[in-house]
Amino acid sequence: MKQLIIIFFFSVTILPQTRVEDIQTFTLENGMQIIVLEDHSIPNANMYFFWKVGSRNEYPGITGISHFFEHMMFNGAKKYGPKEFDRTMEANGGANNAYTSENVTVYTDWFPTSALDVIFDLEADRIANLEFDDKMIESERGVVLSERSTGLENSPLWQLWEQVQGAAFFAHPYSIPVIGYESDIKNWTKEDLQTYFATYYSPGNCVVVIVGSVSVDEVKSLTKKYFEPIAVGPPPRKIHTVEPEQDGERRVNVKRDVPSPYVMLAHHVPQTNSEDYYALSLLESILSSGNTSRLYSSLIDERQLAVEVSTDYSYAFDPYIFTIYGICSKDITPEHLEAAIIAELDKIIKEGVTDEELQKVKNQKLMEFYHTMETINGKANTIGTYELFFGDYKKLFSAPQDFAKVTAEDVQRVTAKYFTKENRTVGILMAEEEEK
Amino acid sequence: MKRSILKSPRARMHSRIAECVHSFIHSCIHAIILVFVLGSASFAQFQLPEYEHYILENGLTLYLMEQHEVPLVYISAVFPAGAIWDENNSGLAAFTADALLSGTKNYTKKQIEETFDFLGASISSQAGKETAEITISFKKSDLEKVLPIFVDVITNPTFPQEEFDKRKKRWLDELVQAKESPRRVIRSYFDQFIFGSNVYGNPVSGSESSIKEINRDDLQGFFGMHYRISKLGIAVVGDISAGDMKNKISAMFPRTPTLEQLNLNVDVNKNLKPFDKSKVLLVDKDDSRETTFLIGSYGVPWNNKDITQIQVINTILGGRFTSWLNDELRVNSGLTYGARSSFRNYKNAGTFYISSFTATSTTIEAIDLALEVLDRLHTAGIDEATLTSAKNYIKGQFPPRFETSGDLADLLTTIYFYGLDESYINDFEKNVDGMSVEKANEIITKYFPKENLQFVLVGKADEIRDKVKKYGELTEKKITDDGF
């Protein structure tokens, strides 16, 4: 094993071109934080806006509004009216997208560097002076209802996820699905949107990351010109609700006409910036990364209990859930698959993981790091994500070492600590006739 | 069918633009990507980076390109061994490609997986409509550990019976699972509907009945027939020395070509004739809450001389967020989360289709509107400002398509299989810029279908059957019926 570990550290020393000191950061007078990385490998650049707002900031009546808002940010502002944002961006060679999670709303622009000034103008206009056109609000409601419906239509997992998440949390707003409930999507008002904008889209609530063929000086002067004049809003309310400790297994059954049952297990785990993050992240890889991972090799390959199995352990500001889910093979009951997944967890709690297994997932983390650093989009997204969830983008560069420090005992300890029956929510989705 | 590990259920993260719209940019390499090989004097200035190209004595075609930004290497190997060669065993090509990783003369399945997983490297093997593609990526320091396995996988697979049996069982389960998602299977229905008994109608993953009939000998037979070194193209891109790599690869394959030259050609034009009427295939999924639909016809093959110009027009019709289709069906009317249009180009054939989905109750409204937009393309044509915007978009979004070594390795194997000329890439910008409004309108008339359209709809048949008859001659299937 020693030799392998040496190889690992050697690899760390031949990091890709980008070094932590290549990244520049500064904060504008209105509190907006800017992070810039020059990368001239292609004549393009990007701009990522990480807003610290997501469904975590919602409550009954306005569920889904963060995500709806993400759509509304494209529907017209003072200078660039409805449709003009996209038309102007695309006519200048740019493209965009955006995503919303429980924690954040992220807007992404990808463009040839020649369009840099236009992109600043477009973004400053909508952040400072968003307008709410009644007609656009109504048509966007239809779009989001279609988005909700097509997710449910095409993925039974989607449906199961919503309900497991809702059962795992009853106090913390992580119980709210990001897409929102249909009745709320149909009923929130223009005033709700205006209040939400004023509360959460204040420049101090945003981290902007720009990576690509730009110069730091140019970006500095453009941010001063376009973003610094944007007015500061009131600080958003803190989310102080703490989910009470779970004190017994919870179970959810969902009926859907599927050919074979779906099983989902969720366990409460701490937030991303906790000390157990690295061990839990390695545990996730041990369970589901690659064909030699524990769940794949045992449940899919050797025992043929499942056709698919996977895990989710996402970045989160507050304590969240670590989720394992699978689809039963033909004639396998959900109880059988559930018991087999739990047995794999218990095995780690009892016997731990091997050194080789641990080294394997550490090597995989290093490769993931390289893949991230291959593209300007990978760099921008990861830098912003680390800044928000780990509190410092520099942690991206120390991640290989932080993972290297985790021991087999650490992995065993976190498994024993969090993967208990009392801390578990189990969801089963299956057709009616198979139910007991 | 290739992915056994699920992606995130996506319930938690919502993008503004659905994958199916956005995948316009991240499309399947064999079908669309080269259409985006677009350069520009004003933006991109993309030229294919320098590379070396050899045809070895045994017929193997080798491409080598040095890229030193990260210490990674990508190798991509392509054989003409896709579903068009399935003959009567639908799914055989895909199963054979998948099973290359089940064990070889010198490595068991377990050894292959343990080596790659331990190093954080990756290996995949899958077949599409026309090709089988085996790709690996790894840290350059691991070359000696992974290269021998890669070569053994593509030259000495043994198709162990036990692994075959397990995979077959799971394959059958996966076929049933896939039909839970109309979006995942609608193209298989569409291809079969368009091409009928022509080989391009073959569903890549096969059907339940056909997979049940496949045995281990079929895989071995298919491998022997279609995985010829003389037909193999390999691209190595990344942190390498081209000279060293050439010597290494050359030394690992037999030096002499396979003596026996079989005629592997299939009649790619068999049973292809123009449509003389509109037809509708209605696939009944009785628990549907929405209708997923494709509307289209034949498209063009790769070697079409106007392929770049066609893509510029398609950008306007349904290839970007502000495209006419997305603007009408999503932005103006809120009928759907996304609407787009696509050309899928094969070596000897192609398809064109409009794709979207909408609530069951708005099916007719959405399809009528899509048809109206297509009609407007023909009747109103395109003006200078719209054309310029599309040109800028397609050029501006071009360089990121070839940003990584993996992208470039895919590009080189695509060049190999489709016999593309470098000028195709290097002159792309010129071709985009040189396109006039007159030419644009000529392209519309020539390549964008106007009548005798073919419709495939997956949804709740009882609620839409009577209304969709107006689009053409109606055929109906249940989604649970075997195959497509």
Image: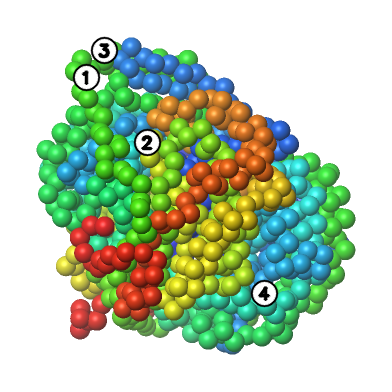
Are labels 1 and 3 on one chain? Answer: yes
User: Which residue sits at x=56%, y=61%?
Assistant: B373
Gap in angstroms between the C-alphas marked 2 and 3: 30 Å
User: Which residue sits at x=53%, y=67%?
Assistant: B369
Secondary structure of residue under mark 1: loop
Residue that carries the numbered disc 1 in the rendered image = B261
Question: Residue A375 appears at what percent x and percent y?
Answer: 59, 42
Question: Residue B294 appears at what percent x and percent y?
Answer: 42, 59
Are labels 2 and 3 on one chain? Answer: yes
Gap in angstroms between the C-alphas marked 1 and 2: 22 Å
Do residues under tags 4 and 1 come within 8 Å of each other at their CB atoms? no
Tell me the tag on residue B256.
3
Gap in angstroms between the C-alphas marked 2 and 4: 44 Å
Amino acid identity at mark 4: Met
Amino acid identity at mark 1: Gln
Gap in angstroms between the C-alphas marked 1 and 3: 13 Å
Tell me the tag on residue A136.
4
